[in-house]
Amino acid sequence: MNYKNVMPCAVAAMLGNHAADAAETREQRPNVILIYADDLGYGDLECYGAKNVSTPNVNRLAGDGIRFTNAHAAAATSTPSRYGMLTGEYAWRKEGTDVAAGNAGMIIRPEQFTMADAFKSRGYSTAAFGKWHLGLGDKSGEQDWNAPLPAALADLGFDYSYIMAATADRVPCVFIENGMVANYDADAPIEVSYVRNFEGEPTGKDNPELLYNMLPSHGHDQSIVNGISRIGYMKGGGKALWKDENIADSITEHALAYMREHSSEPFFMYFATNDVHVPRFPHERFRGKNAMGVRGDAIVQFDWSVGRILDALDSLGIADNTLVILSSDNGPVVDDGYDDRAKELLNGHSPTGGLRGGKYSAFEGGTRVPMIVRWPGHVDKGMESDVLVSQIDWLSSLAGLIGARVPRGAAPDSYDRLGNMLGTDSSPRPWVLEQAADKTLSLRTPEWKYIEPSQGPKIVPWGTEIETGYLSEPQLYGASDSGELENVAARYPDTVKRMQEIVRAVRGNDERLLRQLGARP
Ligand code: NG6
Ligand code: CA
């Protein structure tokens, strides 16, 4: 039995009922809200055992739904993970899907089918808020940030968007609303370059005296906005420039306004927070209360955003008709390039919840993430599931839920595993595939974790001190060895061979081989 209910009740009987429900709900069109945190680790929430931080709103969500303990992002960094989740195609299949610059051109191309397209095709209103990090405009480096961008989220199925182009540590430091800089300041035209600085503009490297809010620890020494230096160069922006302390408020308020406006029609909302990515600079009202310093404060700020959304669902009377999914794009990192003392102040907290590695790595810390699903009346309350699931399946599963048709050839890596998501089917996905920062692939099954041989360095080379998990020979760890400490590849050559064959079949898109191996999800 893979499902545990923390409340004593007849789980088996309920699963039976739910199987029937599942068929019915396929014809329904609940609102769907995807709350997607940035760099939030498997162990970073109170209901996942976090120390020193309380996350009452996320606890409430988990208490009303299913908390997954074996859920995986498709990649250990943002851009490829989000690409996979929103398109249902592994990012390593496509060039140019590594961590994107702030002036990257649109990485998901307009003709590609996305999760938002699935919702649109069924008459939903759709919106995206917060971190985007999948490129904007037609071509990298050629955007005119002072005019509407020719290729933006509307081309990917989002009717409305209020987003950050990349991450808070990358220029341009402005919100973009429906393809145009929000609050645009005509007196301060915007220019962006990832190659050279603009004449006369200060940088963190040359003008550290201007860094009144935060200092970099590695990288992040280029243009200065709000007393914090970033990756990339920008000029102008004026009153459109964001203040880091207001980012959570800004995206949350925009999301709430959208929910109010669309509460009487089915909507899909992708709510991608800036928390808890660097630079961590939460609002004053969250500051100084946490033993872990700003990283803890950012987790609390994330929880606050979650609470605002849940409260809005209640006050609008649409909570029962809304499926909420909460997760993270990749595993955690402590020092990710700013001197915010996150590492010194952990005070016994393990952001990965004891898993090895972290963001960027092939070890479990890179891709095992929190995942909570709530849908009152359809998903049982207070459940815990250790079923193996991957974000790559969300597109097809949600399409299945609302009766959307995935066009032939689209979302090639996404399988409809709605039953896992709603807790009606406890059979695990036979495997999930995970991509590390250098594209080393790992294969996780319920019993094993295999990491393919690769040549990279043992430790992430740019100062975060995370173990990559790269090794020039195959690695195999038993599922019970959750710390991935004992490589047993030499002892189980047949298992290694089988896992390698599955990886080969997936890489080669070889459905027949997958079937032969009895490993089709
Ligand atoms: C790295 C950045 C890191 C972070 C990451 C992307 C440096 C030294 N490090 O290159 O700070 O921005 O990229 O994070 O520049 S992600 O969560 O968006 O993938
Ligand atoms: Ca991330």
Image (cartoon, helix red, strand yellow):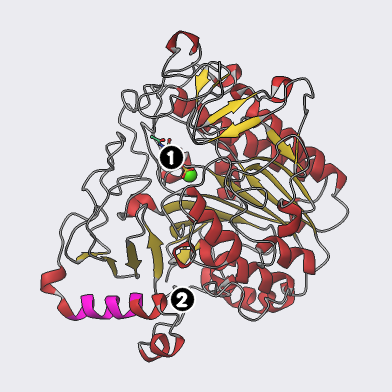
The quarter of the picture where residue 519 lies is: bottom left
Q: Amino acid at mark 1?
A: Asp
Residue situated in front as seen by the camera: 469 or 457: 457
Tell whether circle 2 marks a residue whose Cβ is less than 8 angstroms from ligand 2: no
Q: Is residue 382 visible?
A: no
Relative to 57, say whether 283 is above or below: above
In the image, taking residue 232 as reference, residue 176 lies left or right, namely: right
Kindly identify the residue that appears in the image at 69 percent across and 24 percent down.
Answer: 237
Q: Circle 2 is placed at which residue position?
A: 427
Q: Nearer the viewer, mark 2 or mark 1?
A: 1
Kindly identify the residue that appears in the image at 32 percent across and 60 percent down.
Answer: 440
Residue situated in front as seen by the camera: 336 or 365: 336
Question: Taken as a whole, is the magenta stretch helix, strand or loop?
Answer: helix
The quarter of the picture where residue 242 lies is: top right
Please report contact status of discs 2 and 1: CB closer than 8 Å, yes or no.
Answer: no
Q: Amino acid at mark 2?
A: Ser
In the image, taking residue 456 as reference, residue 47 lies left or right, namely: right
Q: Which quarter of the rendering shows the N terminus?
A: bottom left
Magenta stretch: includes residue 500: yes
Q: Is residue 498 visible?
A: yes
Relative to 197, say whether 419 is above or below: below
Relative to 360, say whether 90 is above or below: below
Kindly identify the residue that appears in the image at 57 percent across and 36 percent down.
Answer: 274
| Local crowd size for mark 1, using a 10 Å CA cut-off: few (<14), some (14–19), many (≥20) | many
Could you tell me how far apart the alpha carbons at marks 2 and 1 are, in whole angstroms? 27 Å
Q: Which mark is residue 44?
A: 1
Q: Which residues are magenta?
A: 494-503
Question: Upstream in the sequence, badge 2 or badge 1?
Answer: 1
Q: Secondary structure at mark 2?
A: loop
At which x and y percent is residue 181?
A: 74, 35
In the image, taking residue 488 as reference, residue 55 lies left or right, namely: right
At which x and y percent is residue 370?
A: 47, 50
